[in-house]
Amino acid sequence: MEDCVFCKIRLKELHGTILYSDDDFMIIKDINPQAKIHLIAIPNTHVPYIDMMTEDGACLLGKIISKISHMQEELGITGGYRLIINQGDNAGQTVAHVHIHILGGEKLKEF
Ligand code: 5GP
Ligand code: ZN
């Protein structure tokens, strides 16, 4: 947790563009956007990987997904968006603090 960039951003020890925060999570702009809009939803509690999360932690992710769906306008998203969670090395997870990528703002490549 001490070396976690997302925790440091939440604690304002590192700069980050925080678009939203509440008792559960925050939404920041990704520093290296992979789409016109690339945001990251980050639970406040530091848990490195999905498979280390409790059921309550996973339920919180569901709550966050629901909140995001009601925030599209304030996040500047129109026409849909994609949510991605990378889990572990094969998926390319680089920050060991569970987070949800929010991609939108343009037609995304299908896969
Ligand atoms: P992952 O690859 O772990 O799923 O995603 C980590 C994301 O965090 C990457 O898209 C990366 O660009 C972003 N990121 C890494 N360090 C920082 C940082 O210091 N600030 C911000 N805003 N994003 C970061
Ligand atoms: Zn963290």
Image (spheres, rainbow, N blue to C red):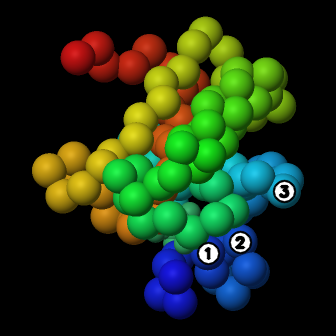
Residue drawn where x is 32% and y is 64% of the image: 94
Q: Position of residue 102 (x, y in %)?
A: 54, 36
The local secondary structure at tag 1 comes to helix
On the rendered structure, is 21 left or right of 68?
A: right
Q: Which residue is mark 3?
A: 23
Which residue is at the far top?
A: 79
What is the distance, in whole Å, between disc 2 and disc 3 at their CAs? 11 Å
Residue drawn where x is 70% and y is 33% of the image: 63
Q: Which residue is mark 2?
A: 10
Can see residue 101?
yes
Residue toward you, 56 or 44: 56
Disc nearer the start of the sequence (2/3): 2
The local secondary structure at tag 3 comes to loop
On the rendered structure, is 17 left or right of 33?
A: right
Q: Are marks 1 and 2 in contact (CB under 8 Å)?
A: yes
Query: What numbered label is drawn on residue 7?
Result: 1
Can see residue 39?
no
| Circle 1: residue type | Cys
Residue drawn where x is 35% and y is 52% of the image: 51
Q: Position of residue 33 (x, y in %)?
A: 46, 48
| Placement of 67 over or under 58, stated as above or below | above
Residue toward you, 27 or 87: 87
Distance from mark 3 CB to nearest ligand 2 atom below 8 Å: no
| Circle 2: residue type | Arg
What is the distance, in whole Å, between disc 1 and disc 2 at their CAs? 5 Å
Q: Position of residue 77 (x, y in %)?
A: 67, 24
The local secondary structure at tag 2 comes to helix
Which residue is at the far front?
A: 55
On the rendered structure, is 97 left or right of 87?
A: right
Residue drawn where x is 72% and y is 53% of the image: 25
| Circle 3: residue type | Asp
